[in-house]
Amino acid sequence: EPEVTQTPSHQVTQMGQEVILRCVPISNHLYFYWYRQILGQKVEFLVSFYNNEISEKSEIFDDQFSVERPDGSNFTLKIRSTKLEDSAMYFCASSEAGRGGSPLHFGNGTRLTVT
Amino acid sequence: DQQVKQNSPSLSVQEGRISILNCDYTNSMFDYFLWYKKYPAEGPTFLISISSIKDKNEDGRFTVFLNKSAKHLSLHIVPSQPGDSAVYFCAASLTGTASKLTFGTGTRLQVTL
């Protein structure tokens, strides 16, 4: 079964450094997402992306964050200057359709640790 | 943000019996509800969804019930199997914001032999 793949599985970085989290969505999917889960907290929506632009973003997704689809297969999340509170599990997801109830297919996540 | 709540952090059920996982919500504008299962070190896996215009949806061993007046939904797993042991998340989406899921805190289900 096709799956969403994320790399790296674990990223350690120092505060203030830039990080790029990478994702390869399912190939025939058109909608892409980033979610995150801080340890012990809920899974939270960050951003959705369709047709090469952001379609929705949460209040968490401030100017320090950006997303890009640099080619036909990758989808990236960049954090320009990491903060301690950015430490979390970051999940990429994709879906075939963007309508309500469309299942999102999640990757296994990248654990980001900011020291 | 307490719009979606799963008040039971854990549940233990014997193999073969029914597992019932509950979820409450506060926002009457939610139009779709979804259940996800999550194993350790993996991402959430979609299980089943229900539209707010329905009160029941069934897929194999999994059935979701929606009570709009009570703002409550439940996931029934019958019969429960050891492989069902995981964390189960309830999620909801608002009309017009299909991609932005609001998740509950999850319920850890343990299916015992």
Image (spheres, coloured by chain):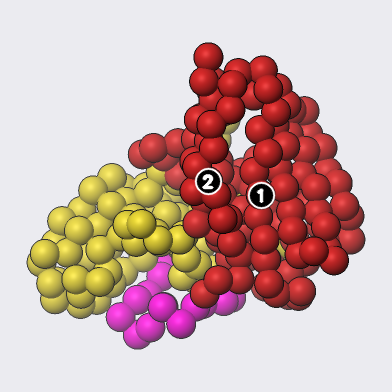
Residue A101's spot in the image, x, y percent?
73, 56
Q: Position of residue B108 (x, y in %)?
A: 49, 41
- For disc 2, the marked residue is B107
Towards the viewer: B99 or A50: B99
Q: Where is A10 relative to A86, above or below?
A: above
> Does the magenta run of residues contain A72?
yes
Q: Kindly indicate which chain is depicted in yellow in the rendered structure.
A: A
Q: Is residue B88 above or below residue A97?
A: above
Outermost residue to the bottom: A63
Q: Is residue B38 left or right of residue A88?
A: right
Q: Chain of mark 2?
A: B
Kind of residue sitting beneath label 1: Asn
- Chain painted red: B
State the extent of the magenta-drawn residues as a range: A52-74
Q: How many marks?
A: 2
Q: Is residue B79 above or below residue A90?
A: above
> Does residue A70 show up magenta in the picture?
yes
Residue bearing mark 1 = B22
The foreground one among A82 and A39 is A39
Q: CA distance from mark 2 to mark 1?
A: 9 Å
Which secondary structure, mark 2? strand
Residue shown at 20% from the left, 74% from the top: A83
Q: Is residue A77 left or right of residue B57?
A: left
Residue pictured at 49% horizontal, 48% vertical:
B9
